[in-house]
Amino acid sequence: DVPEALAGDLRIETQARTDLIEAMAYLEEIKDYASRDLLTKILVDTEEHIDFLETQLALIEQIGLQNYLQHQVEPLKS
């Protein structure tokens, strides 16, 4: 089920974002700026993925699952 898979991914990414923010605060505390900077880059990617997942779920809600799935399939090229 596509919406369920997207929602599951969203839950995982949301928890990852929380964990990253906590880890970054700790790294700041111990002055490990290199690791903090690395996690900052990962956080940006995570937030972009969260935005993508939220957009896809909203789109499914707006246009319906069947229409969403039709738009996800590219026409076969002959």
Image (cartoon, rainbow, N blue to C red):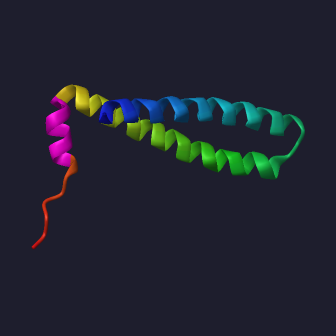
Q: Is residue 66 a member of the stretch shown in magenta?
A: yes
Q: Residue at x 24, y 31 (%)?
A: 60
Residue positioned 31% across, 36% down in the render = 2
Q: Residue furthest top?
A: 61
- State the image coordinates of residue 32 (x, y, percent, origin top left): 85, 46
| Coordinates of residue 68 in the picture (x, y in percent) | 20, 39
Q: Can you give x and y, in whole percent of width and height, for residue 44 in the image? A: 57, 45
Q: In front here: 46 or 69? A: 69
Q: Quadrant of the N terminus?
A: top left
Which residue occupies 14% across, 38% down?
Answer: 67
Magenta span main SS:
helix
| Residue farthest right in this picture | 30
Seen in the image, is 11 located left or right of residue 17? left
User: Which one is nearer the viewer's eye here, 72 or 50?
Assistant: 72
Point out the residue furthest to the bottom here.
78
At horizontal 82% and vertical 38% (from top left) the residue drawn is: 28
Q: Residue furthest front?
A: 1
Q: Is residue 70 above or below residue 53?
A: below
For the C terminus, which image quadrant?
bottom left
- Residue range corresponding to the magenta coloring: 63-71
In the depicted structure, whether residue 21 falls above or below residue 46: above
The one nearer the camera, 47 or 57, is 57
Which percent across, then down, holds residue 48? 47, 43
Instruction: Tell me: 40 left or right of 29.
Output: left
Horizontal relation, residue 17 to residue 63: left or right: right
Among the 4 quarters of the image, the one containing residue 25: top right
